[in-house]
Image (spheres, rainbow, N blue to C red):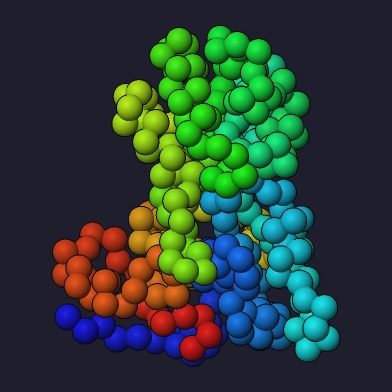
Amino acid sequence: MSINLISFKKIIDQYRVVFFDAFGVLRTSGQTFPGTYDVLQNLKAKEKAFFIISNDASEPPLNIARKYSSSNSKHRILISQEQIITSGMLALNYLQTQCKGKNVTYLGPEESAYYVETSGNPNKPIMKIPDLSWPDVCMFLDDTGYDWYDALNRLVNIVRKKKDILLLAPNPDLLYPAKDGVMIATGGLAKLIELVTNRDFINFGKPSFGIFNFAFEKAKNVFSDLKKSEILMVGDTLATDIKGAQDFGIDSLLVFSGNISKSEYEAHHADLVIRPTYCAESIMT
């Protein structure tokens, strides 16, 4: 079944606020898509507000914002860290309110521990804990920069020893777009641990209602009278970006520049429960 594609540029005037996913929409893991700066500059010129809603919990908001600035005078645009919304922010609030004072271990390099360290909880990377009984909480932060094999096996043994340990996976994404295809994300690693331990992780990222409501409240700081009908979510993944928007009650645009291709979507379109309001090749069209 063939679907009709629309132009992002033609529908944007219907909305006051745009929520963007990051990977697969604005960038790959390594670089910003050509044309991204022009799109964002155009939104600024139209006095639209836009926010990046990311399931990435491995970097502070300021570091993420800097990836969208450019030294090129034509494309010089700096996204404020106030425009960055991450699953790590919700995980941080959970650590501070529900896990205050508890020992937190994490999977990821030490430079990915911004949200864990900001919480004020005692924390150590999983390969540096003093013994298997030390952690009260384990949090998945990143999928690169450490040895999966050793870390995952150690976590399995921790879970077997401590039945009441809390397992947090701020990022539920299974995969994310990379330069030459896709890569396994932290949500994929968490699914493996869920399978072999019969334990569930607590997630904070898309498609959770919480992260969309957090973004909505941020957007209302710009437009106090903002309605959900004035927001467009742009994403490349049905199960997170589009489902989250659908559940929250805002319109969505699925782009085929990331996790799913147009042909894949068309092949399964008739059976899909999760459906975007619009589809486009990319935000550049």
Give the x, y percent position of residue 132: 55, 12
The front one of 196 and 49 is 196
Give the side of residue 214 with respect to residue 238, left or right.
right
Q: Quadrant of residue 54?
A: bottom right
How many numbered marks have been drawn onto this rendered protein structure?
0
Residue 1 visible, this orientation: yes
> Is 1 situated above or below 260?
below
What residue lies at 49% left-to-right and 17% top-to-bottom? 158
Tell me the quarter of the image containing the N terminus.
bottom left
Give the x, y percent position of residue 83: 69, 61
Residue 217 visible, this orientation: no
Give the side of residue 135 with respect to residue 236, left or right.
right
The front one of 95 and 177 is 177
> Is 241 situated above or below 69?
above
The front one of 13 and 141 is 141
Give the x, y percent position of residue 199: 37, 25
What residue lies at 66% left-to-right and 85% top-to-bottom? 38
> Is 152 situated above or below 186?
above
Give the x, y percent position of residue 14: 51, 81
What residue lies at 35% left-to-right and 23% top-to-bottom? 197
Give the side of residue 186 with respect to residue 218, left or right.
left
What residue lies at 64% left-to-right and 18% top-to-bottom? 129
